[in-house]
Image: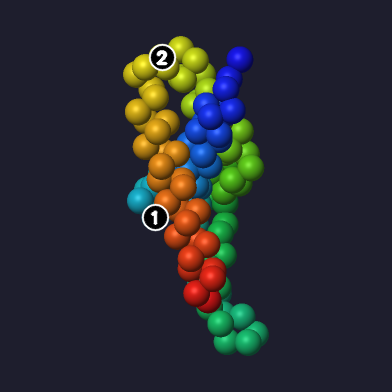
Amino acid sequence: MLSWFTFVLLGLATFRLTRLIVMDDITSFLRAPFHEVEEEEQEDGTIEEVLYIKGKGVQKFIGELLSCHWCTGVWSAAFIYVFYSMFPYMFFPVIAILAIAAVSSIIQSALTHLNG
């Protein structure tokens, strides 16, 4: 049985790992074989990035997975939970780093939102 502290820590680590995979620029090389991002001008003159999934079959499946934070979140949670369960002392530092980074990310987003 997980303590509340461990549950929250695993949740924060899952959030950060998911965001790292799905959204962060540093991992764009992982998504590049499956995604194509194009800039399109909107009617009001703003430029918007539009994501297109490449390929068919497995390539399309992986592209869909990597574009969906809900989908990737499930797999990230499974990965983190399984490795924590199997190798708790070895994997805890990774979980702690991801959780700390998640808290930092949440604080930064909140401050950015408040400062408009």
Residue 38, percent from left and from top: 50, 66
The residue at the point 46 percent across, 20 percent down is: 84
Q: Is residue 83 left or right of residue 70?
A: left
Amino acid type at mark 1:
Asp
Provide the residue designation for mark 2.
Answer: 87
Q: Is residue 115 visible?
A: yes
SS assignment at label 1: helix
Spatial CA distance of label 2 from label 1 is: 29 Å
SS assignment at label 2: loop
Relative to 85, is 47 above or below? below
Amino acid type at mark 2:
Phe
Residue 49, percent from left and from top: 53, 68
Provide the residue designation for mark 1.
Answer: 25
The residue at the point 46 percent across, 12 percent down is: 86
* Pointer 2 or 1: first along the chain: 1
The residue at the point 37 percent across, 17 percent down is: 89
The reply to whether callout 2 and callout 1 are in contact (CB within 8 Å) is no
In this rendered view, identify the residue nearer to me: 65 or 97: 97
Relative to 45, is 91 above or below? above
Classed neighbour count for the residue bearing mark 2: other residues with Cα under 10 Å, few (<14), some (14–19), many (≥20): few
